[in-house]
Amino acid sequence: MNEAAAKPPKRSRQLWLWAALILIGVAMPWVFYDWHTARQSGFVLTMMSQMGMMVIFSLSYNMLMGQSGLLSFGHAVLFGLGGYCTVHFLEAAGHHSFPVPLELIPLCAGLTGLGFGIVYGYIAATQRATAFAMITLGLGELTTTAGIMFHHFFGGEGGISTDRTNASSLFGLSYGASVQVYYLILAWTVLAALGMLFLTKTPLGAMANATRDNFERARFMGYDPRRVRFLQFALSGFFAGIGGGLYAITYEIVTYDAVSGALSANVVLMTYIGGATFFYGPILGAILITLLQSGLSLLSNAWLIYVGVLFIGMVTFAPSGLAGIIGAHGPLARAGRLGRLLVPYLRLSIPAFATLIGFSGAVELTSFLTIGEAQGKHLVLFGETIQVWTPQPWIVTAILLIGGGIWLRRECRAFARIWDDLNADLKDRSL
Amino acid sequence: MEAPALSLKNVRKNFGPVEIIRGVDLDIARGERHAIIGPNGAGKTTLFNLISGRFPISSGSIALNGTRIDQLPPQNISRLGLSRSFQITSIFHRMTVFENIRCALLWSSGYRYSFWSPLWTQKALNRQAEQLLDELNLASRRDLQAGLLSYAEQRALEIGITIAGGATVVLLDEPTAGMSHSETEYAQALIRRVTEGKTLLMVEHDMGVVFGLADRISVVVYGQVIASGKPEDIRNDRAVKEAYLGALTE
């Protein structure tokens, strides 16, 4: 009974955290408001809009991966088809044959996602584990091919485009300005996230976890794991469809990229890096990856390499993702001992920073030596042009990378000792 | 006459050319506690797998309360009121102890695949799960991940999951395997308590538990039932002594 009594404050603190996150989402366009032109920053709006739809998309993916233990390689299909259908809805709205206001079109996109989720789920959910992954891969490729082949619906390689101002609005908004679209996305993101959170707390959500952990035992409790997988798949299609609908509304064009394997791989990345074992993990992953995609891609030609290395690093060292890393600090935080980690973290950060600089130096030097050279670009650091053909920058890079790496390894071991001691101590006290 | 809780007629099972179960006939009356004993490899666990629908039978028939179940998948057999435990602990490792028990209650409480009823508002269901945790002596472990429980606690949870759904026929596969003496005694008392009024069929190697719990005992050797009867009859059965008990006391 004691533990139950200790729970409510923790939950309310989490609630505050989410309220703060939503508040940041609401305030962001105004933080980057340009008073000279009296406009929001287009870059920030686009990035935040992208974050919103990716949050929905990766949360819907985690209904399969984290909650049901199903690794899908074709989840973009449900997202993209929602997008394609939304373009057709908007076109129909232009001909006055689709009297749904823009605010509710994402719901229609969700329903088409649900429809495709039922069809694809009927095929894929018969299997689990590797066979399931292979089927989804096949379905993904199939749909991408269809996207290129069937011009009438998909518009071929050029895709299909539309005008979101075709649709009417419940609130008399024109949705010409992207800030209006952004708030529509934000509202749907919150709704969809709450919806998916709710699902985890229903009998189906519980049995999805159960079939993930031990599908055979679930059968001996009266449940058909195939039915559980199918329902999870179809419902995740609903939410992926909402994401795709918002995508179509934002960009007003959908090409086969939206159903492609690249996007399917991206959602695996986001979910995994964020942490599939926690409900909120994919939110963190979607935000981080979108930040990297928007920010890092401006800074570096080779930004994909950083994302790739981040992914490999997470899989190897932190398989429960960012959320897992945060969650691991929970017991120490509750015991009020997080402060003890401050110095160890500082000690860790110096060699980590050196290694990072060394690594990015190596990547950038190589990139400028090859792609940059072809594009006639020069590497400029602190106002100085770096001569990538001379040995000096390479030597500095090598020293930072190798020296920093060795130092980092030693610090990591020291950190692990302190970490283990602290947690062991905590365990002793609780017993 | 009332149909037996469980009735096996000439049940056979072969894996490829090897016949593991060679014509088993067995009737378990309602409310009876029945133990199956026999040397390793006799086919006891296979028999459980056949009854519970994990494997299909090769020939013969199995009936639960007079209803044929030998062609049904496990989930349908479970819905008819037959539940089983596993020799190798089979729980949901990454879920909490409470969630494990609650999942086991879901189907029999009529929730099916509901994705519209929030579990936190299901007061009766949650209370039932709490009560069962109390009975299993696992209430203090309520919010712990099941995979982190001690072995004996996991075995108790295994039994809890098995009986949670209110099955009338319970199959326990070596419930006390690997337990210390005191743990075994505790488990025996637990089994007696939670299977009150139910039909119990169990495979067990611990003769103390077998003779302590069972109303009747069947001896399975080499895929066949060589003897079936009251504990004292089995103890004195010449064939059993030769085939099984004798081998132990020598």
Image: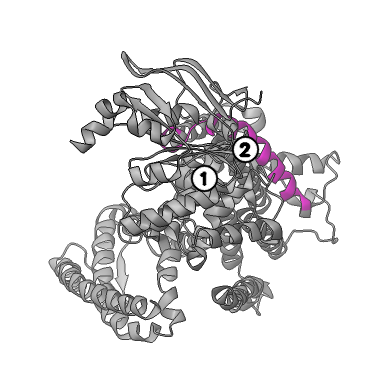
Q: What residue type is labelled 2?
A: Gly
- Residues rendered magenta in the picture: A104-131
**Observer able to see residue A209:** no
Color theme of the render: one colour
Q: Which residue is drawn at 61% across and 49% down?
A: B105
Q: What is the chain identity of the residue bearing mark 1?
A: B
Q: Can you identify the residue that label 2 sits on?
A: A117
Q: In this view, does B133 lie above or below B73?
A: below
- Mark 2 nearby-residue class (10 Å; few <14, some 14–19, many ≥20): many
**Could you tell me which quadrant the C terminus of chain A lies in?**
bottom left
Q: Which of marks 2 and 1 is in front?
A: 1
A342 lies left or right of A127: left
Label 1: which secondary element: helix
Pick the front one: A234 or B246: B246
Q: Which mark is residue B162?
A: 1
Residue A376 x, y percent position in the rendering = 32, 57
Q: Is residue A223 magenta?
A: no
Q: In this view, does B183 lie to the left or right of A180?
A: left
